[in-house]
Image (cartoon, rainbow, N blue to C red):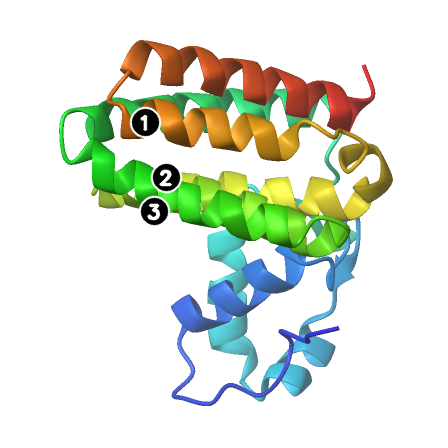
Amino acid sequence: MTSFIEPLAQESTPSIIADKLRQAISHGELKPGAQLGEADLARKLGVSRGPLREGMQRLTQEGLLVSIRNRGLFVIDMTPDDVRDMYLAREAIERAAARRIADGDHEAAGKELLAIVEQMAAAEGDPAAVSELDIAFHERLVQLAGSPRLSRMHATSITETRMCIHALAETYTLSEARIGEHKALAEAIAAGDYLLADDLLMAHMDDAITRLTNR
């Protein structure tokens, strides 16, 4: 397993530290509910506690960490209500991205997304690889909108999505329709059919919520 908690290769900054911790959370190295110890993290990252505290504060503001009085700082737990709320935010961001793409070079965007779908199909049988490509598809979808603000907002919800997938991998990977859902969405985007893409996105998000909350 790749470790994201390791000495930094460049000058330490709160932003770099926050990114390292965000990756560790999203890939399950720092698990939901885990307590963060300053001394241990500072040692593993090779940084002083000042920048570390600033980096952790950024993740607290993003909602990925929570401070509990007289206990310390913890990675959030994703309850079913949290999952639903997170997907509500993701849905809003990705629908906005799809609308922006439809007004631009939607054919090229669709081809890029279809290329990721092809990788997903080739990786079928490797649930971890398919899950990462699933995430890559949605990250690229938002990037293709060319909106830095949408991408920034999307980054936190994608981290939370990864947390859910790692914590509930068996439930999440049961669906056999995942690749087909992504293919249909990419084709709708390539065709510039925003209304269809919008409907497919909402259905896709609803399906993910059902799988991750088992409801």
In the rendered image, the quadrant that contains the N terminus is bottom right
- Can you say whether 186 is above or below 6 in the image? above
Q: Which amino acid type corresponds to the residue marked 1 in the rendered image?
A: Ile
Front in this rendered view, residue 87 or 99? 99
Front in this rendered view, residue 68 or 78? 78
Mark 2 or mark 3: name the one nearer the start of the chain. Answer: 3
- Can you say whether 191 is above or below 60 in the image? above
For disc 1, the marked residue is 189
Circle on res. 141 = 2
For disc 3, the marked residue is 112
Q: Is residue 9 left or right of residue 181?
A: left
Q: Is residue 75 left or right of residue 14?
A: right
Mark 1 or mark 2: name the one nearer the start of the chain. Answer: 2
Q: Which amino acid type corresponds to the residue marked 3 in the rendered image?
A: Glu
Separation of disc 1 and disc 2 at Cα? 10 Å
Q: Which amino acid type corresponds to the residue marked 2 in the rendered image?
A: Leu
Q: Is residue 4 left or right of residue 138?
A: right
Query: Mark 2 falls on what kind of element?
Result: helix
